Amino acid sequence: MASPLRLGAYALGGLLAVKLLAGLVGLDTLSDRLLLGPATAEEAEGPDTPAETPDPAALPELLAAIAAEREALDARTAALDAREAEIALARATVLKQNEELTRLRTDVEALLEQARSTEEADISRLVRIYEAMKPSEAATILQDSDLELTVLVLAAMAERNAGPIMAAMSPVRASAVSRILLERSRLPGDQVPVVVPVN
């Protein structure tokens, strides 16, 4: 059993510890710590802390800042709306130009096809004309014709008809036609320019 003196020392040490703790935490009375709460309703409300109210002198500045921010937002919104309208106009212009380009491409392709068909029909007609002639007569005409025309006509002819005509031509002309016909069958990168000597 503990002695009364020792018990008193324990009680005094405990009291001092509570007082020290109360001083550190900032409690005014020991009853707040021991009762685990405020002793009265007034203490429960705590010290009077007035609600923060804005300074009346700062209110106009605050309103001016809000108005300026609203104006800036309105200006930015107007600028974004104008930019959006510009983009929509540009998009409509591009779409219209694309439609126009598509129409033009279709027209050009149709014209090229028509020109190709006309050229093929003209070459076929020339081939039939030269095939109807005697080989020596056709060779005499093609000998003095444009080299490109001679090549086109002879390339479109059947071999059995083109052979006698080329045989009736001069060797230089027949050689030039043969070289051009050979080069036409090669790929563009492999082609070599044909130089035809002029008599």
Image (cartoon, rainbow, N blue to C red):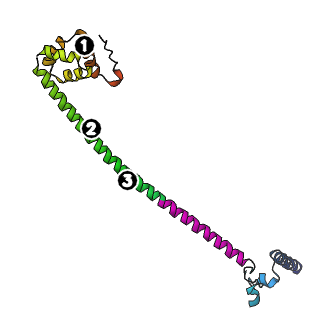
Q: Residue at x 23, y 9 (%)?
A: 171
How far across and down, in percent of the image, does residue 42 sit?
Answer: 76, 89
Q: Residue furthest right?
A: 5
Q: Is residue 146 above or below residue 40?
A: above
Amino acid on which the number 2 mark rests in the picture: Leu
Q: Which residue was labeled with disc 2? A: 112
Residue 1 visible, this orientation: no
Whether the residues at callouts 1 and 2 have beta carbons within 8 Å, the answer is no
State the count of labels.
Answer: 3
Dot 3: what SS?
A: helix
- Which quadrant holds residue 30? bottom right
Dot 2: what SS?
A: helix
Tell me the CA gap for discs 3 and 1: 54 Å
Range of residues picked out in magenta: 57-85
Amino acid on which the number 3 mark rests in the picture: Lys
Residue count near mark 2 (Cα–Cα under 10 Å), binned few <14, some 14–19, many ≥20: few
Q: Residue at x 25, y 42 (%)?
A: 110
